[in-house]
Structures are given as C-alpha cells and as structure tokens.
Amino acid sequence: MTAYIIRRLFYAIPIAFGVSIVCFALVYIAPGDPLQTILPEDASEETILMVKKAYGFDKPIPVQYFIWLGKVLTGDFGLSIATGRPVTDEIFKALGNTILLAAGAVLVAFTLAFTLGTVAGYRIGSALDRAVTGIAVIGVSVPNYWLGIVLVIIFAVELNVLPATGMGPRGSDSFDILVWNDFRHVIMPIITLSLIPIGIITRTTRSAVAEVLNQDFVETLRAKGLLETEILIHVIKNALPQVLAVMGLQFGYLMGGSILVETIFTWPGSGFLLNKAILTRDLPVLQGTILVLAIIFVATNLVIDLLQTAVDPRLKRS
Amino acid sequence: MSNGSSAPLVSVEDLNVKFVSRESTVNAVNDVNLTLDPGEVLCIIGESGSGKSVSMRALLRLLPERRTKITGALEVDGKDVLALKGKELSDFRGGLVSMIFQEPMTALDPVYSIGHQIAETVRRHEGCSMEKGLERALELLELVKVPSAERRLKAFPHELSGGLRQRAMIALALSCRPKLLLADEPTTALDATVQIQVLILLRKLQEEMGMGMIFVTHDLGVAAEIADRVAVMYAGRIVETGTVQEVLNSPRHPYTQGMLSSTVHGNMRGKDIEAIPGSPPDLRSLPTGCSFAPRCRIADDGCRAEVPAEVTLGPGRIARCFKLDETAAPKIREPMPA
C-alpha cells in the first residue's frame, strides 16, 4: 500500500505541472491588457514600458513562466495589480473563508445525501424512494443562486432572523464560527451551497446501493445468517468507491467557491476573489487563485483515489 | 443420527412457491413433498426452471418476501421454517442450515478478505471475537484443502481461482457445523477436473460431519457420484424419487426415462442421442393435467385432464404418473456408476 501511495504521488506531479502551464497561459490567451487598469489613459510609451518592466511583462512568455513558477514554488505569487497586496495573502484569506462554507456544506450535504440515498436504494420503487428521488431532482435542477435569493427574501427581508450578507460586524479577520452571532452568517450560504451536492450524491448513492443489493453475494450474506445491520455495512462498503468519486468532485467544486453564491451573500471567499480578479484583469491574482484551486482539485482526486483503493482492493493496479 | 431418533432432519409438505407480480403469477414450485434423514444426501435433479433452486431458497427463506407466496409446511430439525422471524431466522441461517451457491465468482463479497468473511460468520453465530473467528477460519481453510491457507486467509476473492473460491465458500458454509447443507449446483461453474475434486471433498466432509445434504444439479453424473437418494423435478413438481440406483437404473417416470436416454454415457459413439421433444411448460400457465403430458410419448386424454397423484412404488420410492404400468418394462441399458 505504501509503495502504491508513493507511486500515485509521483503521477500527480506531471499533472500539477501541466495545470500550472495552462493557468499561466490561459491569462495570455484571454483578450485585454492587464496594465490598462492601473495606467492612466494618456500614459506615455516610456511609462508603459517602465511599468511592464516592473511587473516583468517585457520578457518572452516562456521566461516569464519560469520566473513565475520559481517564485510560486517558494510560495510567492507576486503582488496584486489592483491592490498592491501580496497575492499569497489574498488567496489564503479567501480560501480560508471559503473553507468555512465548504466544510459546512460537506457536513450537511454529504451526510444527508448519503443517508437519503442509502435508504432509497434499499427500497427502490417505494413511496420513500420516490420522495428522495424528488429531493434529488430538485437538488440538481434548481439553480442554487435562485435558492440563495429566495432564502434572503424569506429569512433576511421578510422574517428578519438571519443576516443577508457578509461575515458580520467584526469582519473576516476575527470571524469565529463558534460564536452564534458569527455562525448566523454562514447558515444561508451553507444551505444554498449544499443544494447541488445533495442532489448529485443522493442519486449516486441510491443507484450504487441498489446495484450492490442486486449482486449475488448479498444472498450469501443473508444465507450465512448475518443481521441486517451487518449486511448494511457490507453493502455500504461496496457502494462507497462510486460515491467517493462523486464526493471528491463535489468537494473540489465547493473549494473553488461558487462565484454566484459568494456574490449573493457578499462572502469574501475564493469565488468572490476570482470574480473581482477577472473584472479588474488582476493577472497575478487570477493565475495564483486558479493554480491553487487546481492543485487542491488534483490533491482531492489523489486522496479519493487512495481511499477508493483502500476500500476496494480490486482497484489496485499493478 | 445426532439425536439417535428416527425423525427426519428435513420435512417438506405440500410446498408451493408462487412469484406474484401485477402482470402474472409464476408457479415455481407446486405441491412438493420431501424428507431427508440426518446424514443423508439427496440430489434434486432437473433442468433450468424446474424449481429446484427455488425450493432450496424457500428452505432458507432467501426468496424476496414481498413478491413471493410460500405455502405448505417446512420443517428442519423440528423447527418450523416459515414461522421464523428476525433474529431467529438469522440464527437458523448459517447456524443450523447453510448454503453453497453455484457461482463462486460472485457469491463472495469482493471487498472483504476470505478470512474476514468466514470469521464474521463464526463471530455472528458463536459470539466469539474476530481473532478467534480468524483462527477458526484458518482451520476451516485447511479442512477444505486450500493450499497455503494462512496466506489465503488475507486474500480477496478476485485473487483466487474458481476452484479455490468454491472451497472457501464450502469452508464458509461449514464454519458453524450446520446439520443441513444446501448445495445449489456447486460444481457447475467449475472446470471438469476441479469439479470432481470439489465433489469428492464435499462427500467426504458430509460423511465426517454427519451432515444432511440437499444437492441440486442438472448433471446425472454428479448425482450418481454423490447422492444416496434422488428426486427428479419437472415444472415445479417432484415427478420421481427413490434411491440413486433405483432412479438412475430403472426410472419409472417418462420424463426421467427421457432425460436418461438423452444423456451421453458409456459407449455411445455413432449412435443418435434421443432428445425429449418440445420444451418445458410456461410456469405462468401450467397445463391442467400432468405438466409433462405435452412432451410425453405415452400420454393420453386422462393425463391431460388431471394432475397425477403420488404413487408409492416401494419404501421411499414414489412417482407421479398415470401410466406406471406401461413404464415398468425393464430397460436394457448399462447401469450408471454409483
């Protein structure tokens, strides 16, 4: 198993490399000049050249890439063009805020969806199954930003019991989720973000559990006299690899932060940061954020891969 | 045998199994009667869909409850099988009665090791720790002659060959010393050479442990090898029972006779094999009379009007046919090896 883990880690390195090239290149393919936003409209050729030199934009693109990569590897993503602050700080602050929501949504959505999906998978065709399938269809087809707006209208505007936006009066630096007054701010964003994962994971769990229950070995488990609870454990372990794959993807999406949801709730997370960077053509922020998110995605996939192999030994390829 | 009394280990009376759905009702098993003494091996022979596997599953209550209607009386070791509920039923399965399945490739859980799957059964029935269960699993794997058993304990099903997997399955079934072993075509999916090894092993273990065994097969050679008594099933009914010699050497039911003459045996090179014309009836709408009548050479209007009752030809020798006088003619054929 240890050898397998090391090998999978090595496989992840070229992927991360490829991702970094794509991140870097993407911004150059996109139209528009990043310096336009910080330079005055009547700037002279000299000034433009000077600023370009200061940001390193005068060198050939491959050279720029390696300089950028070298810095990135030491944790330096450069300075934000828009704010002048270090990109690394901005990214990790935003990411920290997004993790608050993502962790909440993972907790709510994964447990709820897994339970509902398992129950429905055990009773395919029953009224309960139809109800759960209904919830799942709503989850995947209702736009989450719409739900967010509806929640704001009901709970913030009409009932006035939950705050509509932001992270509270003390801001993001001293935000403490364990304090009720701060916790109130995450309730609606977490519910909104949970919607899609609930739908997708419920459906996957339901079909995976139903598929496992149709397999011959379940009859053997009954025939050898295991109790239903013991059989359930066997069924879940067999269904888990499929469900983990989908959970991994959903976790990745949640870490990326939803631009729409974070914008609705003015939540200063990674989606919010990305949105701002796109609008202001803040190249270093854009590159850095995309790269960090992509690496998180690769790492998540790696972890899921290893978990799947730990659960199902047939997946271990030599 | 174990209690010294002459009470049968298994007694099945008027067993009927129907699969009910909105569109149709499948009469899978019809008025089946059978008994099995402790330590005896009964072979149920029949083609696919004759109800032999369904009868087995009824004995272990493995059929899906919502869609199945079981009537009749099922008794194993004095226990009323149809009355068992919840934990009693789980104790019964794998404790008193256990089962070996046809497909060793799919009958074991792919994500647990062989050792774990045996040990958890031992733990479940004997209430011991997992460690004790694993020790027991090792003994069992050695008992069923799995080579390098210690290493195989940690192996997963996909790492073993079909023959080894079936041996592991047998070890699993024997793990709690059942009084009755149900074997549902346990050798059908195996290679011919492995088949005979597994068969000999099963017979040996059955004798050593004094278990009763019901062995389902469609292979007459297998039946001749392992059975004390034979029951032939057709369209959900037992059409003939008797000792293995009686049934295979002097069959009385036209179906059994047809089945035996359509089997390749002895020196048959150059001779045509006699096949039974037609195909088994649709279990959703059985013919009113004898189910075999449409394919029978000697059937007449009487056969098509009424289902023949069981006719006792001798002790434990029964056939369901109106024409037993005509089928009694001694057939000239070499005896099956028994």
Image (cartoon, rainbow, N blue to C red):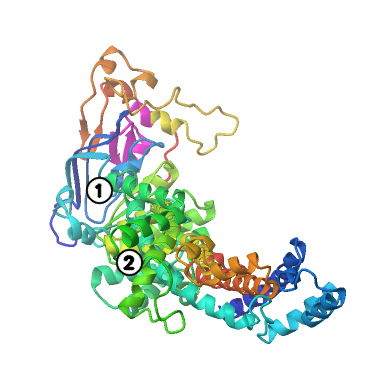
Q: Secondary structure at mark 2?
A: loop
Residue at position x 64%, y 83% in the image: A86
* Side of A226 where A66 appears, left or right: right
Q: Quadrant of the N terminus of chain B?
A: bottom left
Do the residues indicated by labels 2 and 1 lie within the same chain of the protein? no
**x and y percent of residue A36 in the render?**
75, 69
Q: Is residue A285 above or below residue B205?
A: below
Front residue of this view, candidates A136 and B218: A136
Asked whether the viewer can see residue B187, the reply is no
Residue B224 occupies quadrant: top left
Q: Is residue B239 magenta?
A: yes
Please name the residue shown 59% across and 83% down the image: A89
Q: Chain of mark 2?
A: A
- Disc 1: which residue: B59
Q: Position of residue B295 (x, y in %)?
A: 39, 21
Q: Give the image location of residue A189, x and y in percent.
A: 41, 65
Return the x and y of residue A47 as percentages of the image width and height: 83, 78
- The three-letter code of the residue at mark 2 reads Leu
Residue annotated with mark 2: A162
Q: Which residues are magenta?
A: B227-256
